[in-house]
Image (tube, coloured by chain):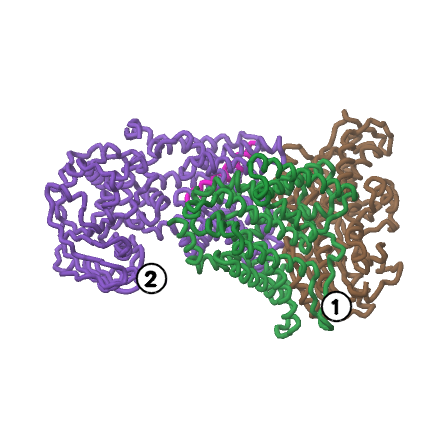
Amino acid sequence: MRKVSALFLIFSLWIIPALGVSAQGGCAVDENSPGITFGVVVSLTGKFSPEGVDTFNGYAIWHDWVNNEQGGINVGGECYRADIVYYDDQSDPDMVSTLVERLIIEDGANFILGPYSTTLTQVASVVTERENIIMMESNGADESLFTRGFQNLFGIITPASGYTETGIAALFDLGARTAVIAYEDTAFPTTLAQSARDHLDNLGMQILAIERFPKNVADLTSMFTSFRELNPDVFIGFGHYNDAILFIRTAKELGFSPDAMFIPVGASNPAFVSEMGDDADFIWSASQWTADMPYDDPYFGTASDYAERYVEAFGIQPSYEAAEATASALALQLGIEAAGTIDTDTVRDALQQLSAQTFYGAVQFNSSGVSLSEPMITLQIQNGDFVVVAPDADARPVWPAPTWEER
Amino acid sequence: MACANLGRTLKFIMDMSFFLQLTINGILLGGFYALMAAGFSLSWRVTRIINLAHGEFVLMGAYLAWFLLNPKESIGLDIGIRIPIMSIIMVGLALSLGLLLNRFFLGRWVNHPWQRRSASYIAGIVVTIILYLIWSASDFTPIDPFLAIPLIALFFFGLGYIVQDTLLNRLVDRPFLTMLLVTFAIKIMLENFSLLIYGADPRTLNLAYGGSFWRMGESNITISQTRFFALVIAGTMILSLAILLRGTRAGQAIRATAQHRIAARLVGINIKQTYATTFGIVLALTGIAGAMLSTFQPFTPDSGSSWTLRAFAIVALGGLAHVEGIVAAALLLGLAESYVGGYISTGWAIVVPFAVLVITLIVRPPRIQASMMIEQA
Amino acid sequence: MSSQNLAPPSRLASLFSPAAAIALILTLLFIAPGLDRSTLQFLTITLMWVALASSWNLIGGYAGYTDFGHALFVGVGAYTVGILLAQGDALSLAGRLTFPQALIAAFLIGAVFALVIGFPTLRLKGAYFAIVMLGMLAMIREIARNLPGVTQGGVGINFAPPFPQMLEIYYVMLIVTSIIFLTSLWIFRSQLGTMLQALAQDEIAADMRGINTTTVKIGIFMLVGGFTALIGATRAYWLGFANPDLAFPEDFTIQMIMIVLLGGLGRPWGPVIGGVAFLAIQNLLWTNGGEAHLIIMSALLIVIALLFPGGILGIFNSENRSTGSRLRRDQPSEKSTLLLSMTDTLREWQRPETTNPLLEGRDITRDFGGIRAINKINFQIQPGEIVGLLGPNGSGKSTLFDCISGILKPSNGEIFLNGEDITHLNPWRVNRYGLARTFQNIRVFEGLTVYENMLASRKWRAVPLWAWMWSAPPETRQRADEFLAYLGLSPFSHMSASGLSAGQQRLLEIGMTLMSDPLVILIDDQRHQSSYDRRHQNQHFTLESGAWTHIFPDRAQSPFRDGAVSPPLRPQLWIAHRRRHTGGSPE
């Protein structure tokens, strides 16, 4: 349902009506205005599709807002319309490379809005680096992306260490002493697992097992069997949305019921709750952003304003990936406006000096192109709702979680 | 830069319950593999066609089961797609029913071929329409994959019959390269059709009893219900296959054709029809396997190749001669994957079927090559 | 079989192919700086696919070994370059090598991989080779994923900037493609090409004609492995990233095969034509059909496989292969003088100076499972003898021949040729020691012309390794001419061997045995080939017992039956019945 309405909406947004809505910059764009082309490559299908679609939706929200409410992008006094050309990369790195090239060479993209996941961003960034086009990436969060000396890559990320810090501390306070970790063997989950291990070590918790699984995995039975034998207090799983689903199903099938299952990525997506139903209860996860956050900006308003806007467009609460995507696009726009031109080098300098408040939090890029966000907040799903349990808990977490048979 | 090797904690090798659970998992998996490979080995044995699209047919069964369970679900599937899928299913069903009636059942009562043919196909169409009406009257309730087995088997039987008759029969006396290329092309086509229709998302079935399990007493050992049912179905199908091959006239004809095509023809067996029937059975088995698969594993359009290669590994290991060989080899493979996954890692467990295939073919080619030589004689 | 096919192709035409190739390459070289990005990209991709298809063609087309897992060498090249050039803690060499050096390393590592993989797998025939390579590709991909210490596993290897520009990659790809294509063109026209084609047609017969099939197979596989690794390395360098799925792409293999088939399997220009056609079609389909383009491509593949197995080139060259550019140099030498009569030729050749029996068998036994096909056969054949091997159907005559010639190994016993123990030798070795044979069901190379058949059977023992890359010398060609003339097959020299009648094919086979200058000829079951032109026989086949010793399986040997000079045939061996002792074999 989400995908269909997303695409439908985007199509309707393409035909931008000349509403003449006057906004901040005094701009009002229509079909005849000059346009800046933003190339978008996301995973609308494939393993990363749930997050990819969220990312796309985030860009779509920004696109709609900037053209219809903001009246366009104000570049040195001239008003430009934001045009999006997008392709589906099917979660395939090979396609990403081809498609980004296509966007730049054939579709004339001036800027690229990045895909979901570190793996795909790795490939895309090589192309943009070579072609000297700025890429604002929104959801590929491994720091290693930014240590390669690339000039044209920018992104708002939470450092990997920030994903599990509060959650593990909270679990420790509740009495957890042993843990097992499972992680997908791509860059980002690997870094997450590393930092989780460090956190656990610092607290003196015992790590009973750390297991790696490949991206295309379909069966985790053996791994979870060994986890069950080890009988840990906590299970921590790093992957993506579809992996989260697989974790729960496998655990349920084998009767593996640790006191807590902590799945930072994937389980904080509202779609996860609707797909898993009751099985999603008591799962711990993490998020960079929820609609209750106290951020405020002159563009989208408060965090809850943004959430409302999203619900109106797509019928479902926004995941943090969608919000992050909108924020990244917004940051890029602000950078272009500050630069007063679409020339890559000038925009790059402008971005590096940018400092802005958004509904998503503060945005400030360092010399590597990274804008660091606050550490993630830890959530637990209770009765189908996301409840903040750390660092400033809204409610008590349910600990230990009941076993599968008890539910 | 993230170092990808984080090190692991050693597993206790000696723990009995761990071993037992892995064994149970392996048997559940292996039994299913036997069904998956049974069709493959049958088509190879009888028609001498190595079907590189086998995995895609398995997936087709899985997608069919998914569709039957989610007829109104429109994650990515809007009505523009659902209608063609539905039509294809109905046409396939009608054709299969017609085929079966024509070939096997009405022969006794209606002698005249045209009358029989038209009666069968009309009956097929009528029954299909009735079924559709019943289903739509109940507002398209989701059909449980296990209950849908007869339907799935029927659909795939007809599909197999037609595919063999139109396409694969042309491959029979061609050089092997042609056979490999054509089946490979079919694989690509099917893969991309699935991609086009269903998208690249991994899909799983949301069954009410999806994660349920039985626990053995007070111990840690669990048996997943869906996998167990799948195993039961697999066993039943294989048993039926064995009975079919050994106890019926049709089965005799199939075995005769497998052993010596020319002699079979001389004895009066219609080779084309036998081939078509065989492939119908093959796809029926394969489709059921796919439907079973969907109940406990996520699947994507490109997971087909791993199934084909698994089937290969099993046939390489178990030989083409008997069904028992396939069952044994399948169980071995399932156990191997389970043990490797448990004692070493999930990543290495994925290597197992490919390694088995490569090593078996290299080390023991005579077993299969002997059958290849018979073909050349 | 129309006569216009029999005219030898002109000398001028033989230069066309390489000239055209060089011209094309130079053109591509010089127009590059002036092209726009889009065209440059299209050309680079086309070049890459032509290169891939060309290298696949060498193993799949020339040698006839259909490799369904070829993409694994792409990955080998990708990871070699990745490990050598990437930053990070993968290998301490990082950053110290330049890309050209890494390319050379990729070639070598690719060749080594091919050697290691080819050794066990090239023993498999046909479909099994295809399948095992398919499995090998999947296996190696997953192993790469599971060795993060070496390959960074699923995380992948990031290449360090600066990244190559498109023009740079274009030049590299052009050079790589040129190397591969020109090499394949060269091989096609050389004796190595002859060997490969014979191998592809009928490996057992090629063995029997003295071609060291093992070395040839593995050698070409190593070359192919290295070439493909080069392409993979360039591609990885371009992408700037390598992970198991990217480096070992699943759908590369089918595209390679499709291109080769589309253009024409087994011919050097096939991949070029196929590559251009394929990419043009794909471009067309992408812009119009989008995601359906793969479906259409695979439907195309089915059509090609079933209806046009010869590809585009096959449509134009539907007669026999020699009217193409094939083997322009291997035509009858115009300098060939008058044909000597066979008898004169024979008398000039050496007779082995020895008192030992020329061919000796001791207690030869061969079992097949529980059945004993031949049981303790003993015989001794002296130089200059003509021996008949007689026995009822099923008594094991052909089995004995197979054992002697090395196609089967005896379960027990020993065989000596001119004093050398040939019991366990491969057929090509046996041939090189001086034994040639014909086959019961006539094995000639049907896809080659009569003339090429003869050249494929030359005395390979006398050919050093470096000579493989050249075409046959004049002496060999003259010899082939003379034998063909003697056998009455000259008018058919440039006809495909499949166009001959069975009797003519039998004669050709005999000619092939003569080409290798053997000490002993085994002729298997003459009688079955009934469509003989007897007059032909009588005129031309006045074979004197000269330098060779023959063993014939049957008494009434047609060449000798009504011949003018018919040496007495002493039935030397009787194999009366399977499993029984053979009758006496007088010395």
| Chain B visual colour | green
> Which of the two discs, 2 and 1, sits closer to the camera?
2
Q: Residue beneath label 2, please?
A: C371
List x then y, in percent, for residue B374. 40, 52
- Give whichever of A54, B199 is nearer the camera: B199
To the question of a shared chain for discs 2 and 1, the answer is no
- Give whichever of C576, A149 is nearer the camera: C576
Judging from the image, mark 2 belongs to the subunit labelled C
**Quarter in which the N terminus of chain C is drawn:** top left
Which of the 4 quarters of the picture holds residue A375? Answer: bottom right
Amino acid carrying label 1: it is: Asn
Q: Residue beneath label 1, please?
A: A202
Residue furthest to the top:
A32
List x then y, in percent, for residue C416. 22, 60
Residue range in magenta is C39-58
Q: Residue at x 12, y 55 (%)?
A: C353
Q: Is residue C420 left or right of residue A45?
A: left
Is any atom of residue A111 visible in this view? no
| Chain C visual colour | purple
Amino acid carrying label 2: it is: Ile
Determine whether C227 is above or below B18 in the image.
Answer: above
